[in-house]
Amino acid sequence: MTFSPQLMRAVETLQYRATVGEVATQAGLELNVAQNGLYNLAADAGGHLQVAETGDVVFEFPKNFRTILRNKYFKIRLQEWLDKTWRVVFFLIRISFGIALILSILLMTIAILALVTAASSQDNNNSSRRRSSSFNLPWLVWWGPNPFRVFSPNYYGPRRYGSATSSKSTTSNTEKGGMNFLEAVFSFLFGDGDPNPNLEERRWQTIGQVIQNNDGAVIAEQLSPYFDKLSSTEQTEESYMLPVLARFNGYPEVSPTGDLVYYFPELQVKAQERRQKSVPNYLEEQRWTFTLAPTGQKFLAIALGGVNLVLALMLGVLLQDSALVAELGGLVGLAQALYPLLFAYAIAFLAVPLGRYFWLQRRNQAIENRNAQRQERAALLNTGEPELQQKLAYAQRFATQKILTGETITYGTDQDLLDQQLQGRDDLAKDWERRLEEGQ
C-alpha cells in the first residue's frame, strides 16, 4: 500500500484532525482522491472517523501514524531506504563531473609534459638535424619562455588556485551551507533543477485556500490570477472554472443579473476553527537560474574548462607523433586511447552551459510574460468596478462555515457503539426535559 506524500503532510499540518475538504485544499488534491486516501490511511494507520449530525465526516489520526505505517509495510521502509540511497548516489553523480574535469586536466598535463620532454631530449641528442616527421608544433612554439612551464610545480600561477585557497573557499561555503567546488561544477554544467517543481500542487493549494478564505463561495475573477494564459473567450465564458468545479465538487449559481458565482459545500466544512491563511495575489513562477554556485566557484569552473580545452587541443597536436607516443606508453598511451573522450568532454564542458544559457533566456521570458498576465488579472479585483462588487456581494449569500465540534459529533469509531447509543439516549432525554421545562 502506498500513500500520497502530500496527503500525509496535509494531515500533519492540520494537526491530525481534519475533514476531506481541508485535506484536499492543503494537499492540492481532488476531493475524491483525498477522500479515498484518507479512508485507506485511517484503516492502515489506526485512524478514526467521527460523524456529525449533518453526515459530515472528520478524520482523526494518531501523531505517530508514520511510524505505524513504517512498521506495518515493508514497501514503505524500502522506499525510505531507496530515497536515502538515491540522495547518496545523486551526490556522487554531482561530484563526478568535477572529479572528471580535474582528472582530465591532470592526465593531459602529464602526457603533454612527457611528450615535450621526450621531444626535447631527442632534439638535444640529434642537434645536427631536426625531425622531419609529422611532429610539428607551428602554433605552440613561439619566442620567449617555454609555455609548458605553467604546469611546473615551481610556477607561481597554479598556486593562485592552489589547495589552500580552494580548501578555504570550500570550507567557507560548507560552513555557510553552500555547495563545494565539485558540486559547483555540476551546477555550472546542468543547473540546479526546476525552480517550480511543485507548480501544479501550489496552484491547487492556493485555489483551494482562496475558496476557504471566502467561506466556500467565490467568483471566477478571484481565481483567474492562478491560471496560465487565458484567452479572451475563456475569460468571458469562465470555462477555466470547470476544472475547479470538478476538483472540489463545486456548483455554479446564476444571479438575478445573469452573473455566475460558484460555491463549494465540502470546502465549507472544517474540523475546528482555523485562522485564514494568507495567499499570494497571483501565482508567481520562479525564474530559472543559470547556477546557484558562488561567483568565485563559477568563474573557477569556467577557467578550468578553458584550460581543459586548451590542453585537449595541444595534446591532439602532440599525439600526431605516433612513434614517440608508442615509445613512451604508460599514461601517454592511456591519454591517446582516451583522447576522443577527453576532447569531447572539453568541448561539451563549455558548449553545454553556453547552450543552456540561451535556452534559459527564452524560458524566463515566457515565465515573465505569464506572471505579468496573472498580475494584470489580479489587479482587476482592486479596481472596484460595480459589476465585480455586485458579483462578490451575491457570492456572499452562499458563503458559510460549518465547524464540527465535539457537540456536533454523533458517532465515532474510537468509542464503543453501545456507549455512544446510551449517550445518545441520555442526550435525547435531557433535551426532552429541557423542552418540557421551557413549555411550563
Image: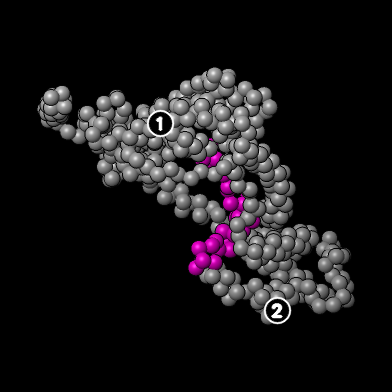
Residue depicted at 55% across the width and 28% down the height: 391
Q: Check residue 390 in the rendering and tell me which mark sits there, or answer none.
A: none
- Residue 254 in sight in this render: yes
Q: How is the image coloured?
A: one colour
Residue 353's spot in the image, x, y percent? 69, 52
In this rendering, position of residue 317 left or right of residue 238: right
| Three-letter code, disc 1 | Thr
Give the magenta range: 173-202
Q: Identify which residue, 340 or 90, lies in the foreground.
A: 90
Q: Name which quarter of the figure residue 3 lies in.
A: top left
Mark 1 residue element: loop
- Indicate which disc, 2 or 1, sits on the residue closer to the N terminus: 2
Q: Identify which residue, 407 or 394, lies in the foreground.
A: 394
Q: Check residue 155 in the rendering and tell me which mark sits there, or answer none.
A: 2
Residue 329's spot in the image, x, y percent? 67, 63
Q: Identify which residue, 318 or 322, lies in the foreground.
A: 318
Residue that badge 1 annotates: 400
Q: Identify which residue, 225 or 3, lies in the foreground.
A: 225
Quadrant including the C terminus: top left
Residue 181's spot in the image, x, y percent? 58, 63
Residue depicted at 55% across the width and 40% down the height: 199
Residue 238's spot in the image, x, y percent? 60, 25
- Residue 78 in sight in this render: no
Report the Cα–Cα distance between label 2 and label 1: 78 Å
Q: Name which quarter of the figure residue 96 lies in.
A: bottom right
| Three-letter code, disc 2 | Tyr
Vertical comparison of 418 with 45: above or below: above
Residue depicted at 63% across the width and 48% down the height: 287
